[in-house]
Image: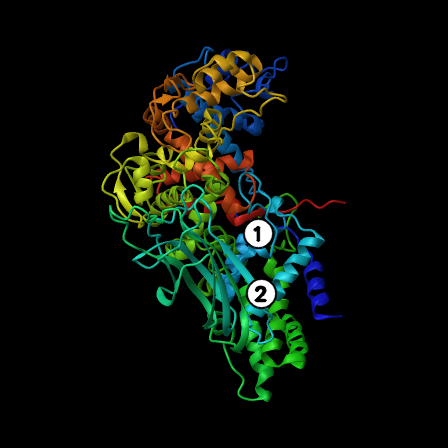
Amino acid sequence: MTPRSLLIGGLLSFAVVAGSSREGSLQAQAPATPEPAAEQSLVDKYCVTCHNARTLSGNLSLAGLDASKPGDHPEVFEKVVRKVRAGLMPPAGMPRPERATLDGFAALLETKLDRAAALAPNPGSHLLHRMNRTEYANAIRDLLHLDIDTTTLLPADDSSEGFDNLADALRVSPALVERYTSAAVKVSRLAVGNLLLTASTATYRVPGDLTQSNHLDGLPLGTRGGTLIEHAFPLDAEYSFRIRVRGAAIGLAAANLQGEEIEVSLDGERIKLVPATATIDVKLPMKAGPHALGVTFVRKPPPGADDVWQIFAANSGVQSVAITGPLAPTALGDTPSRRRIFVCHPQSPADEGACAKRILSTVARRAFRQPVAEADIQTLIEFFETGQKAGGFDAGIEQGLARVLVDPRFVFRLEREPAITVDGKPYRVSDLELASRLSFFLWSSIPDDVLLDVAVKGTLHEPAVLEQQTRRMLADPKAGALVTNFGGQWLYLRELKNARPEAAGFTENLRQSMRRETELLLESIVREDRSVIDLLNADYTFVDETLAKHYGMPNVRGSRFRRVAVTDEARRGLLGQGSFLLVTSVANRTSPVSRGKWVLENLMGVPPPLPPPNVPAIDESPEAAKASSLRQKMEIHRGNPTCAACHRIMDPIGFTLENFDLVGRWRTRDGSAPIDATSQLFDGTPLDGPVSLRNALLARSDVFVRTATEKLMTYGTGRALKYYDMPVVRHVVRDAAKNDYRFSSLVLGIVKSDPFQMKMKTKTTP
């Protein structure tokens, strides 16, 4: 068999048994509650009218269920608790008691549900869990000190519950196995280096709507526009650079690059200065390893009043940079990946076997996240010997490394059931499995040596040790994955790249600034261990000149982001940020429906009902053509009883945000009509703009914290949460309240919980 077929066979031939969990730790806390039978009388008076076997409103019937014993039907009563806590039930227009009564009713149900759950804890089961491509890239980075672009190596991952790291969405197919095998071969070759590596071309394109008239962050001062490229050069060699440039033009005038110069910089130092032309070809010798390549214009002073024929190059810019190589390689180079891999160097041919064993066993231990058996090392040595015969010591290490990268213990997060367990009973995962759960949660990557050593000692599960490791990992730069990966999906930041608003003055620069603002806000909460409620109510934000001008903030200059105080109440927190407002709009207008749906799902944890089939667009009716504002069209649309059920929940939220246009600029008119931001929340709370909506959400801040905890726990456990997880979520939130809902308190609560540390034994099928 060829080495490649052996690699594919290694990935296909594996078996896994699902994993495990720790003893229950739920402590029910009983708040002040009504009389024992009060909950049933409240249900009979306010709920059963709609939620009965005949009407089945919301596909839910409470008839015949004993509300004083919610633990007998936890799935049903968890839905009741969620709706009541959010203020959605009883619905607007129907009789409803005071909020204090509803809160007491929900608290009583929660207490009884928590007590029932504590008697029969269910930490859930985990399916076979494959690394997604983001985690794969991070694992390669931490294992080999090599940055790779997985978008060219692996297909995009499916999502479930809003996240792409959930086990049930990460399916496996023979075609995907082939892609992982191919990736292993390419990555091992890049990491080790191979003088026989053939030249290839990587093209980096600059978005066409990126304004390049000003300095861009990360590029040398005294320049404008251009692009900054992080590129890994595989060998010491010559490389060819083809730079395409768009010249400034007015109307149909020819492109003009007269007097313009292009600067090429490497790691911040200028290495080439050439006159700007439409196509520039440059060959440069490069050292192997990762480098920051900058290609930009030298900034020229603007034309004077007398230079009437000179075009100020506001619309000229770099279009793309294509890097081809290696050409005529001279050496393997001293790269971070080679330094990481080659922990020894044989002094003679007789030393090669022992050195190879040390190298491959070191890599395998980190890659497999566990000590490696002698039989496994021998398999890697066999691959090493095959490569060694064909191309020497380095080629042998390359083959052995490829075998490591294709092994199921690297690609999958395997958790094996202990031999002595009982069907349907929870059990604790091993410390090594807990280490992987922790590192993929906080870093979206594999454990480092420190965490792995603690797990090997068998002490990671001890509460003090687990907390110490969690806090250490949160302080590590790799915890930035919680911002870009978790936050990017929860807050829809990944969707920004797909937004194509038809708005005057909108540029790629503004899109990037919007994303960075929200990332920096979330990062400040993670790094400074602030209350997660600050996401709603922060009195500060982060802007550069582009975003400051967009928001109307004075005295902000330059491309550097800086922290500024928010003096406009409407801009505080997420609801005033351009990223949220843009992704919840459509191409040519705002979308009150999308904005309302986003707030319900992501801030309140109560997604609206699915729309019925064949719902007409809001502007299809003849009456809508006469409407002068979007709100008037929406009022006509939801006059349809079929549409009203969904829209009466979402629209009030969206209407109160209508002062923000489709790209988040403040406005007072929609076309010729003045903005009417007044509405009423589903619980009767009056709204008149974004400030009132934020205050309404803050009045139910416990609902927001619960939602944030659910999102974080879904992401952290890698599975969708079920009704039996809700008592755990409440336990985490109650404990976090003692610490002002600081971010670390939520993380620690999840890490110490049963669903994170335990697993339900899969019932045996006859």
Q: Residues within 10 Å of mark 2 (few under 14, many from 20)?
A: few
Residue in view at x 46 percent, y 40 percent: 496
* Residue at which label 1 appears: 132
Residue 461 in view, yes or no:
yes
Name the side, left or right, on which 357 lies relative to 278.
right
The C terminus, quarter of image: top right
**Residue 22: x %, y % from top left:** 53, 48
Q: Nearer the viewer, residue 14 or 619?
A: 619
Name the side, left or right, on which 12 lies relative to 404.
right
* Residue at which label 2 appears: 200
**Earlier-in-chain disc, 2 versus 1:** 1
Residue 430 in view, yes or no:
no
Residue in view at x 38 percent, y 49 percent: 212
Relative to 462, is 706 above or below? above
Name the side, left or right, on which 737 lies relative to 641.
left
**Residue 411: x %, y % from top left:** 60, 58
Instruction: Residue at the far left: name it.
Output: 555
